Every structure is written in structure tokens, then in C-alpha cells.
Image (spheres, rainbow, N blue to C red):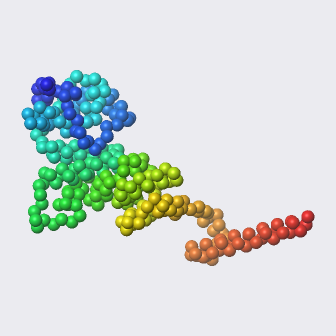
């Protein structure tokens, strides 16, 4: 039985009696921020009550709405009770509240945003009901992405791009979190089938390389044309990336005194190429002379 006592307008509940939100898209990590939170609660207690809602047919389930990190810290400290504030919410409203209470955090992984935006969008559609027959629908249903964008820093288009990440295999999504694959190429890869993504994973492991945007776009186009297979993926992945080509950089001030009269980049490039060609011939003549003198 849930032990609830009303004290000074607040309720106090045992941490074990609170049910965390099952599909929470935000991971509770034992990082430095958590260590700091635990130490703060150890010294000062929980200053902001957890927000909970009674769920279940009999209202006997205490569902956590906001305060997952505080609840985790309380359990780590072995607290007997925690302060809670009750709200009346439907399951869909809880889903929206869970997302809203966490999206303002400083460190959010792309995978967390992907799941959070998808969760909130689906929940908003539940609360809004079915759209009217004559309602304007462009892109996502009822433009819920634009509604979400009003309360976050991401645009509606960016929100839709994050949601696309949910179509990636967990292994590829983890690479996005680890910044091994950038967001833009990851979105392109999300259009590949499950089998195609598995082939890509094998190639990434064997070649120890991740796809660039142009490579991801090429794979997406071939996939949509029904022409992408393991051999095609390998062929695309072994192509040298533009940013991997060796570039020789020379500071302008170092060679500027030799480039007088060369006003355009093309003129300067031609001058340097001719200078290299001339010097190469000079060195060859010197080597020929040395061989003749022996």
C-alpha cells in the first residue's frame, strides 16, 4: 500500500512507491551532474517536490511526471520519503509533461531528442483528437512539429529531422550520440532499410570509417531506386572523402613577395605550379650533372 502523509500542503511518499515513467526518452545517467545533485540533496534535502499523478483504475498508482533525476538520487541516498506534489493528468498529458520538463536540460543526446520529440508529437495528436476533414495538413499531421517548435530552440524542420533518427538501428543511433556520424548524414541514412543499415554497419566495422553526407545521400538515392546492396555500400564507403584529400597550405605572406603581379587566385596557383615545375627540372639537371661527374 502507498504510504502518503500530508504535511504542510505537501505529500511525502516512499521512493519505492513511485512508478517512474516507463517510456522516458531521457536517460538518467550517473555522471558528474548526478554526483553533484546527490551531494546537494545529501546536504540540503530535496528542495523542489517531485510532480506525480495518480493513475490506474483505483488511482493507486503514483506515476512520476517530473523529477526522475531527483528520484534516482533519493534512492541512491536511501531516503525513506520524498516530497511530492500531485497533479491530475491523462496518460497523454503525462507524456507531454515528461518531455517538456526535460527538454530544457543542458546536455541532451540526439537519441534522446529523437525519442522525446516523437513521444510528444504522438501525445499531442492523442490530446487534439482527429483533425477536421478540411484542416490543412502539410508535412506532419496538424503541424504538431510547428507547435512543438514554439517552446524549444529547434525549428519545426529540425524537429522532424530528429524524429527521423528513430528509424536508425540502435548501433547507428549510438554512433550519432558519440558524434561519429553527424546529424545530417544520419538523417539520410534513416531512409535505408533495416537490411541495408546492417550491411552499412558491417562496412563501417571492417573499413573503420563512417559515411560523409555525400556518401549517405548516394546510398539513400540507390536505396530508393531499389539498387543498393552490400557491394554498392562497400564501393561507396571506400571512396576517398573530399575532406580526406591531402591539401598543402602555404601562408600568403610567406610567398607574397614572389607573387607580385598575380592578383587573382588562379594567377597565383598557375605561378606556383610553374615555379614547382621549373624547380623540379632544375633538380633533375643537377642530379644528371652529379652522375656525369662521377
Q: Quadrant of the N terminus?
A: top left
19 or 268: nearer the viewer = 19
Q: Is residue 261 left or right of residue 33?
A: right
Kindly indicate the quadrant of the structure image that contains residue 227. bottom left
Task: Please indicate whether residue 270 sits to the left or right of residue 284 in the image.
Answer: left
Q: Is residue 218 visible?
A: yes
Q: Residue at horizontal 28%, vertical 35%?
A: 69
Q: Is residue 99 above or below residue 4?
A: below
**Residue 8 figure quarter:** top left
Looking at the image, which is closer to me, 177 or 48? 177
Out of 196 and 3, give the one closest to the viewer. Answer: 196
Is there any visible trace of residue 213 in the rendered image? no
| Residue 53: x %, y % from top left | 14, 37
Position of residue 240 relative to residue 177, above or below, is below
Residue 49's spot in the image, x, y percent?
19, 33
Residue sitting at x 26%, y 42%: 24
Residue 152, position as x, y percentages in the image = 26, 52
Extreme residue toward the right, this view? 294
Position of 84 compared to 275: left or right?
left
| Residue sitting at x 42%, y 49% | 175
Q: At which x and y percent is residue 90?
A: 12, 43
Residue at horizontal 86 percent and vertical 69 percent from the top: 289
How many numbered callouts?
0
Which quadrant would residue 258 be assigned to in this image? bottom right
- Quadrant assignment for the C terminus: bottom right
In the image, residue 283 sits, relative to residue 91, either above or below, namely below
Amino acid at each position: 500500500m502507498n504510504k502518503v502523509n500530508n504535511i504542510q500542503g505537501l505529500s511525502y511518499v516512499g521512493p519505492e512507491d513511485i512508478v517512474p515513467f516507463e517510456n522516458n526518452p531521457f536517460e538518467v545517467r550517473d555522471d558528474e551532474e548526478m554526483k553533484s545533485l546527490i551531494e546537494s540533496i545529501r546536504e540540503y534535502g530535496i528542495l523542489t517536490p517531485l510532480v506525480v499523478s495518480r493513475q490506474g483504475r483505483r488511482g493507486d498508482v503514483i506515476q512520476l511526471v517530473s523529477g526522475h533525476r531527483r528520484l534516482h538520487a533519493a534512492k541512491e541516498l536511501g531516503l525513506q520519503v520524498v516530497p511530492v506534489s500531485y497533479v491530475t493528468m491523462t496518460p497523454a498529458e503525462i507524456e507531454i509533461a515528461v518531455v517538456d520538463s526535460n527538454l530544457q536540460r543542458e546536455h541532451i543526446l540526439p537519441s534522446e531528442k529523437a525519442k522525446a520529440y516523437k513521444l510528444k508529437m504522438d501525445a499531442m495528436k492523442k490530446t487534439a483528437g482527429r483533425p477536421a476533414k478540411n484542416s490543412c495538413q502539410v508535412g506532419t499531421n496538424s503541424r504538431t512539429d510547428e507547435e512543438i517548435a514554439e517552446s524549444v530552440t529547434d525549428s519545426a524542420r529540425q524537429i522532424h529531422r530528429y524524429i527521423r533518427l528513430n528509424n536508425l538501428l540502435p548501433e547507428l543511433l549510438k554512433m550519432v550520440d558519440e558524434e561519429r556520424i553527424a546529424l545530417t548524414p544520419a538523417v539520410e541514412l534513416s531512409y535505408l532499410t533495416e537490411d541495408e543499415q546492417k550491411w552499412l554497419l558491417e562496412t563501417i566495422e571492417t573499413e573503420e570509417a563512417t559515411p560523409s553526407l555525400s556518401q549517405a545521400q548516394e546510398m539513400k538515392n540507390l536505396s530508393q531506386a531499389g539498387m543498393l546492396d552490400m557491394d554498392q555500400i562497400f564501393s561507396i564507403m571506400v571512396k576517398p572523402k573530399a575532406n580526406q584529400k591531402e591539401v598543402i597550405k602555404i601562408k600568403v605572406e610567406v610567398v607574397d613577395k614572389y607573387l607580385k603581379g598575380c592578383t587573382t587566385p588562379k594567377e597565383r596557383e598557375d605561378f606556383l605550379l610553374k615555379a614547382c615545375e621549373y624547380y623540379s627540372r632544375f633538380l633533375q639537371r643537377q642530379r644528371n650533372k652529379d652522375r656525369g661527374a662521377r
